[in-house]
Amino acid sequence: MSENEPILPTPASEQPQPACDRCGKPGASKFGDEFICDDCYVACGSCCAGEEL
């Protein structure tokens, strides 16, 4: 790559999905300062997302 070529962002289809901080499952969503998958979110209940479980 030459110095004059712009650096383009990686397309979303090629970026890895974030993994759940609790179980490691891909496709997690960010809640507070951690990533949580749907299964862990449902298991802990929406009232305690982001708190220690």
Image (tube, grey):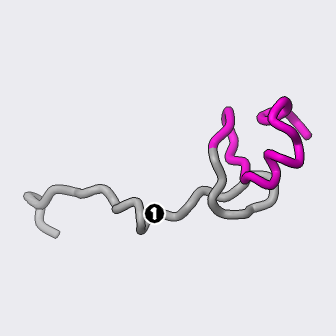
> Residue at the spot x=72%, y=53% of the render?
37
Verify whether residue 50 appears in magenta.
yes
Q: Is residue 45 above or below residue 11?
A: above
> Residue at the spot x=52%, y=64% of the render?
16
The N terminus sits in image quarter: bottom left
In the picture, measured across the screen, residue 23 lies left or right of residue 33, that is right
In the picture, measured across the screen, residue 40 lies left or right of residue 34, that is right
Point out residue 12 in the picture as x, y percentages from the top left corner. 40, 60
The residue to which callout 1 is attached is: 15
Verify whether residue 10 appears in magenta.
no
Q: Which of 9 and 40 is in front in this view?
A: 40
> Residue at the spot x=42%, y=68% of the render?
14
The C terminus sits in image quarter: top right
**Quarter occupied by residue 10:** bottom left
Helix, strand or loop at label 1? It is: loop
Q: Three-letter amino acid code at disc 1?
A: Gln
Point out residue 42 in the picture as x, y percentages from the top left corner. 83, 47
Point out residue 7 in the picture as x, y percentages from the top left corner. 22, 57
- Specify the segment rendered in magenta: 30-53
In the picture, measured across the screen, residue 10 lies left or right of residue 16, that is left
In the picture, measured across the screen, residue 41 lies left or right of residue 18, that is right
> Residue at the spot x=80%, y=55% of the render?
39
